[in-house]
Image (cartoon, rainbow, N blue to C red):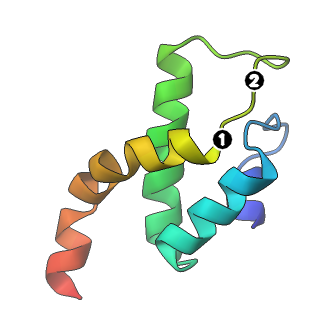
Amino acid sequence: MELVTRPVPGFPPVYSPGAVDAILAATACQPFLLQVLCSVVVEELNRRRWQEGHPLVDTKEVAAVLPKAAERAENYFLDV
């Protein structure tokens, strides 16, 4: 879970508890898939210029980026 909530020192809280659960479930806790999915979420937050105090990422937002994350991880799935 820390790979999601604290990927680097000082990473702000951006995920609701439900979003963390959705990320862990969607990736089956596979480190590469966790990184890909969280990277896509953070890119979306950066696009929106998210800052601390803004609403946390929720389960709907996680679900919305799953197709993009799966596309980014395509080679992983080809090798599995």
Figure quadrant of the N terminus:
bottom right
* Whether residue 60 is visible: yes
Image x and y of residue 14, in percent: 74, 36
Task: Report whether 57 appears left or right of 78.
Answer: right
Q: Which mark is residue 4?
A: none
Which amino acid type is marked by label 2? Pro
**Quarter residue 74 falls in:** bottom left
Q: Residue at x 80, y 53 (%)?
A: 17
Which residue is depicted at the point 56% across and 25% down?
45
40 or 60, nearer to the observer: 60
Residue indicated by mark 2 = 55
Q: 49 above or below 34?
A: above
Q: Residue 69, how many percent across, how many down?
A: 34, 52
User: Does the image show residue 6?
Assistant: no
Quadrant the C terminus occupies: bottom left
The amino acid type, in three-letter code, at marker 1 is Asp
Residue 36, image x and y in percent? 43, 55
Query: Residue at horizontal 54%, vertical 42%?
Result: 60
Which residue in the rendered view is the most extreme toward the top? Answer: 49
Q: Which residue is mark 1?
A: 58
Image vertical order of residue 28 relative to residue 62, above or below: below
* Residue that protrudes farthest toward the front in the picture: 60
Local secondary structure at mark 2: loop
| Callout 2–callout 1 Cβ contact below 8 Å | yes
> Residue 38 or 16: which is nearer the viewer?
16
CA distance separating discs 2 and 1 = 9 Å
Q: Where 74 sits versus 14, above or below?
A: below
**Within 10 angstroms of label 1, few (less than 14), some, or many (20 or more) residues?**
some
